[in-house]
Amino acid sequence: MRCGGITFMNGTRNMQGQLKFAQLYRDISVIHKGEYMYKDFDYDESQQLYYKSHEDMCEFAVRSSINVAKKLRQLQAQRNPGGTEYWPTLFDEPDLWGLHLAGNPFNVMYMVVVDALKTQSTPEQYKEFGKRVERFEVTATYAQTELGHSSHLRGLETRADYDRDTDEFVLNTPSITAYKWWPGGLGQCSNHAIVMAQLYIDREHKGLHMFYVQVREEGTHEPRPGVHIGELGKKMGYLGVNNGFLGLKNVRIPRTRMLMRHAQVNRDGSYVKSPVDALTYFAMLSTRCIVTRNSAVALATAATIATRFSAVRRQSPIDDSLPEPQIMDHVTQQLKVFPEIATCLAYRLAYDYLRELFSATSRDIDHGNYNSLPELHSLSCALKVMSTSDCAAGIERLRLACGGLGYLASSNLSNIYVNTVAACTYEGENTVLLLQVGRFLMKSWYAALSGAPVAPTASYLAEVQQSPDFGLWTGSWSNLVRAMQFAAANKTRLAFKSLSRRIENGESERMASSHTGIGLTQAAQLHARAFVLHRFCAEVTGPKSRARSPALNRVLQQLLELYLVNVTLSSLGDVLRVVHLTDEDLNKLQARLEDALAKLRPDAVAIVDGFDFGDKQLNSTLGFHDGNMLERVFNAALKAPMNRKSVPKSFHEHLGPFMRSNI
Amino acid sequence: MRCGGITFMNGTRNMQGQLKFAQLYRDISVIHKGEYMYKDFDYDESQQLYYKSHEDMCEFAVRSSINVAKKLRQLQAQRNPGGTEYWPTLFDEPDLWGLHLAGNPFNVMYMVVVDALKTQSTPEQYKEFGKRVERFEVTATYAQTELGHSSHLRGLETRADYDRDTDEFVLNTPSITAYKWWPGGLGQCSNHAIVMAQLYIDREHKGLHMFYVQVREEGTHEPRPGVHIGELGKKMGYLGVNNGFLGLKNVRIPRTRMLMRHAQVNRDGSYVKSPVDALTYFAMLSTRCIVTRNSAVALATAATIATRFSAVRRQSPIDDSLPEPQIMDHVTQQLKVFPEIATCLAYRLAYDYLRELFSATSRDIDHGNYNSLPELHSLSCALKVMSTSDCAAGIERLRLACGGLGYLASSNLSNIYVNTVAACTYEGENTVLLLQVGRFLMKSWYAALSGAPVAPTASYLAEVQQSPDFGLWTGSWSNLVRAMQFAAANKTRLAFKSLSRRIENGESERMASSHTGIGLTQAAQLHARAFVLHRFCAEVTGPKSRARSPALNRVLQQLLELYLVNVTLSSLGDVLRVVHLTDEDLNKLQARLEDALAKLRPDAVAIVDGFDFGDKQLNSTLGFHDGNMLERVFNAALKAPMNRKSVPKSFHEHLGPFMRSNI
């Protein structure tokens, strides 16, 4: 990377692509960004997005997503007709985020709906209507959350009553709190929806089921009778995905439109229960895993932008005799930027493990074995929570690290932030998920106490119970990981104690659990931290290191060192409760932090170059690989639509008359 | 407050107005919101703001700000002609933020420019052109930051060369990095600007000075010859304030347009230096104080919205036998919301002290005494940094605590966030300011070591030096304050040690200071924390408590308890380095946290009602005092402009053809 004539690579090898996020997270490396998908990408037009009205942003999102779909479908037809490796697999790939700048209104369709149809409908159903969604002949979204009900699924109000006379379900949202609320693409783009509703047969409640409901006419796209559908309004981010609302009034669908793979309603109204309730939620679990990956990638894009910015921006001479340095030479700037580079890698590597566990569990389930489901559930929750909250906070820190220029829409950092932070709420609100992890920890702690087996990701709890003394502090990597495990185990122990005491005092288990909420969430957070530290350490020092070049290993080790030390220092309050550290030990840790930052300084630009994001994918005036930052910021400003006129209308109508009124 | 038929006041007295932010921060309580200023406020139109194009948002901002100005000027003329208590004093009052929803393009004019003209120009100059700005006959902004230069003022490139032949200054921005960048209202609204530029006389550099420059024609508003001016583009927030850029090419102004109160250029080109450089920066200091107040108010508005939301929203039954509770009954929700109520009060009270110190210092300066300037500078920096970062983070936590609905623009929470977080960067970037506070601490530590006097806000450093043993941990409020002071002193000691070691090893003082950046900023943060804790404690327990009702004192004590315990637990890593706490002590602290939350639960709604913000000021579908939350969210969605048509254009042009193309 060369910026304004200055070489940033301080004498080190070229890392181009070595830490490539794309290669790390997907196996098909078929289309290189810029060469096919971004070929006719209009950068100037994409920069105009933020100036548009909401309506025009939504139009932009539909148009650009359809363009992506067209290209991918074409590619698939050309190279491997009937396959899926290009279309729809790559539709929402992070590589293509630059093309979905206002969001992809159809990503729920391919991330959730097709999967749900495949796993929840019978083969006949899939053939009849599932296939049509997959082929994009119709559009569908997934309608679960309601205006008055989100995390508490059993509280959903939308109901489907079986009408034996006509062999139909009659769907209703009986109040505004029952309106479906949030589904992506529902507002304007979907003519079908999978509606999650309470099934009633002869007024008898049969629990939640999925119904495939047509909401708009296929030809005209007009809402169907009884369907009240629309856009739910401007949001902080996801500017163009037309999240929508849906009210249903006596909407009738054939009985065969209930997804009946696991539970069935027969013609005579008899009901066959699903053998395992958990199966209904397995699709959500898969989405939750993708959220972890996407958060890590989003942080990596922001880290790339901020690192390049820090290499180009010059500010505040360290010594008056010297010119203003690259701000990356300020240790305070290093502390803002470099840990985020490490964090995105840490979550990417944790995701690897999660993905493997997901695959293994899927295979087990196919063989009727549900044993590892609780652990997969807990781990997917824990990583979803920590990756979204850490990555969102990291992106915002990186945006702030770019000073005022990071506040400009043209930096794209605010857009990356507002899209990432949304994931703290969707696919399971973070606190709700942490409480579930907390309950998993309580069960694990209890199991360990009673000598019962404990899931691998929680096995350290049993170890700490057996030898509760941390022993010698060495400050080695494994020692730091162990310290975090001890901190997590300690919080788990304390939460377990509070919980037990409350139950002994007569509270119900649910009530006691609710009152122990703070302890449970804190334990869950530390548990997730310990897991991420452990995986990062295992990936870097484990057998895989033998397959990597020494140069790459060195960089990964430096990032691991930074991550471990920085996380430990940030969690010191918890660590010091379980490990005795002398003042000298702590000073050493602080020195290691500064040392790790200094060691990364010469390689930082090369490392993010190694992530190999394309300029068009980053779409940031601050983050082009050529480093011509200020010129781009300046030119982007000149192109603001308001600059087309030298005098705005508001001067003639408001400002001018007011100034004259006083004279 | 009654919400949907449920009374929230669990048997306690009405707090209406008792913690009124308005009364707390200003003495004139002359216009009650809603009664005059908001009389013809169009709520529906204001809710449409977020749907507009950027150009229309800017138009909206100009129009609404001029409307506010008109009303206030009218009020002033009616009630006290010639006075200033209504106009312009109240122009940017937080009470009126609901009327400036897209920002006030003229607030720089009254917050900075008029003040700068008053303090930096001679009486003759003020009469000639300053008065015209004050009267709004012309519009002016303050142009200091440049595209390539922000924090490092001495690096500014814009220059003013004195031309003795014509008795003029010739102003130039010699490159795009020299372009003035950011001034509020510069893009479209200002016909004048105070331009900060390097003065040259006979090519000799005389340092930075302020120049009053006309940039647009008064009648036509067209840019003047040599002036390149425009809007710098969409930003994360401050949607309509048209922050602008300014390039100057041989723009000539009369010599008498340099602001000459303190330094002068005479007709013959002779130069008289300002007696005290600091005077030039005193205006910035005043603005920085206001930022602290505004951050606290912004957090208070968000806390009001989130508290009311938490009282209305029902979610997740604690026990299956019970209905879904108000989410405020979940301790995890309490932990998200209640500490922010305490935080906004803490900063509001810290601001009181700052404002008094500012007034005292101003009086001293008028008498030629500059002694307390360093302390005022340091305290204003410290509080600006911590209030902006804590309040912004708090607002975002509160927004997230409102779940998905907090993501809707109609909640107004994202708008409050993006406007507040901007203050982390403007008026002195937070890290740059922390480093200045850090240097103040180094000087103070050194002074204390040498027995020299130490400023009152840093006097605890001397005390810790004299008795470095913390002594007994009692957990009392003063003990918690003291623990934070010891933590701050410890970090200061460590930073001083690092700094000294580096200097001994041959680094220059500047270089050593730069390399100690992490330690300095950490010490500065703890120093500010200790100050805020100390002030909160002093205000609640000190003599002022005698003038308050017992009920109000009780609430303030509960908030203080929560704040002290929560901040201590959050800073435990630093506290445990200086105070030995047993496991039992720590468990007690955790129990106190939960206890403090539980105690605040019955009063929380009453407390924020006591802040007394008007519904129109909050402008949030989630935060109306009547608690009709979901209906408002629903109605706001229906009013999204896209819902005017049943089928969007994008269906006919893009989506429909694509779906058919596959069949």
Image (spheres, coloured by chain):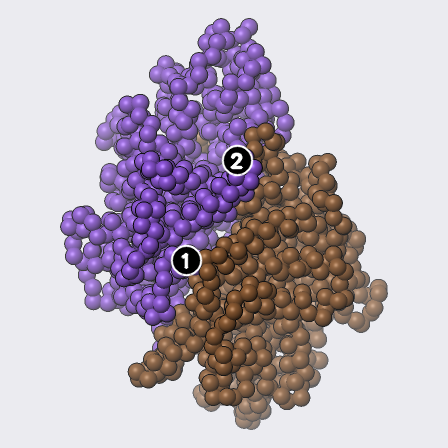
Chain colours: A purple, B brown
Q: Quadrant of the C terminus of chain A?
A: bottom right
**Discs 1, 2: same chain:** yes
Lower sequence index among marks 1 and 2: 2
Helix or strand or loop: what does disc 2 sit on? helix
Residue drawn at x 64%, y 51% as measured from the top left:
B600
The residue pinned by badge 1 equals A577
In the rendered structure, the residue with mark 2 lies on which chain? A
On screen, A504 above or below B236?
above
| Crowd class of label 1 (few under 14; some 14 to 19; many from 20; radius 10 Å) | many
Instruction: Name which quarter of the figure residue B135 lies in.
Output: bottom right
Amino acid type shown at disc 2: Arg
Say left or right for B638 vs A615. right
Viewer can see residue A660: no
Amino acid type shown at disc 1: Arg
The residue pinned by badge 2 equals A510
Instruction: Name which quarter of the figure residue A608 lies in.
Output: bottom left
Of A659 and B548, the residue lying toward us: B548
Q: Position of residue B568 (x, y in %)?
A: 52, 61
Q: Quadrant of the N terminus of chain A?
A: bottom left
Residue drawn at x 76%, y 50% as measured from the top left:
B14
Of B485 and A71, the residue lying toward us: B485
Residue drawn at x 34%, y 70% as measured from the top left:
A584
Say left or right for B473 vs A177. left
Q: Position of residue A481 (x, y in %)?
A: 31, 53
Q: Position of residue A331 (x, y in %)?
A: 36, 69
Q: Position of residue B399 (x, y in %)?
A: 55, 48
On screen, B259 above or below A83?
below
| Crowd class of label 2 (few under 14; some 14 to 19; many from 20; radius 10 Å) | some
The answer to whether mark 1 and mark 2 are in CB contact below 8 A is no
